Amino acid sequence: MSLEAITSKIKEKMAMAIGLNASVKFDFGDEGCIFVDATQNPPEISDDAAAEADVTFETSLSAFQEILAGTQDPNIAFMMGKLKVKGSMGLAMKLNAILED
């Protein structure tokens, strides 16, 4: 799955995250970045790697694709070191539920 396809999937899922009121960054290293500003409705999504976020998820594109597809539990990915979280852990847990649906 390409970065564009994952961006589209995140856009779909974040549209259902009404009231999130936070900024989120998905950092895929050299493969790119997705920044979500959910402080506005609808959430604004860009590839701004320099933007500050309330929570940042660092992972590979392939691992994140598995999380979105439901074949990889994000909690297990976190414990195995495939997914790193920087920032608000409470917000990360809210996003866990949004991304898994």
Image (cartoon, helix red, strand yellow):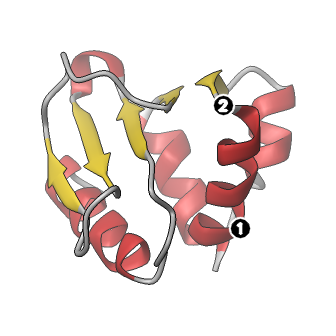
Q: Position of residue 55 (x, y in %)?
A: 53, 32
Indicate whether 20 appears above or below 31.
below
Q: Residue at x 67, y 27 (%)?
A: 82
Q: Which residue is mark 2?
A: 88
The quadrant of the picture occupied by the C terminus is bottom right
Q: Few, some or many C-alpha atoms within 10 Å of disc 2 (few <14, some 14-19, many ≥20)?
A: few
Disc number for residue 82: none
Disc 2 from disc 1: Cα separation: 15 Å
Front-most of 65 and 23? 23
Q: Residue at x 74, y 34 (%)?
A: 89
Q: Mark 1 or mark 2, which is nearer the start of the sequence?
A: 2
Q: Secondary structure at mark 1?
A: helix
Q: Few, some or many C-alpha atoms within 10 Å of disc 1 (few <14, some 14-19, many ≥20)?
A: few
Q: Amino acid at mark 1?
A: Ala
Q: Position of residue 92 (x, y in %)?
A: 67, 44
Q: Residue at x 24, y 58 (%)?
A: 7
Front-most of 60 and 53? 53
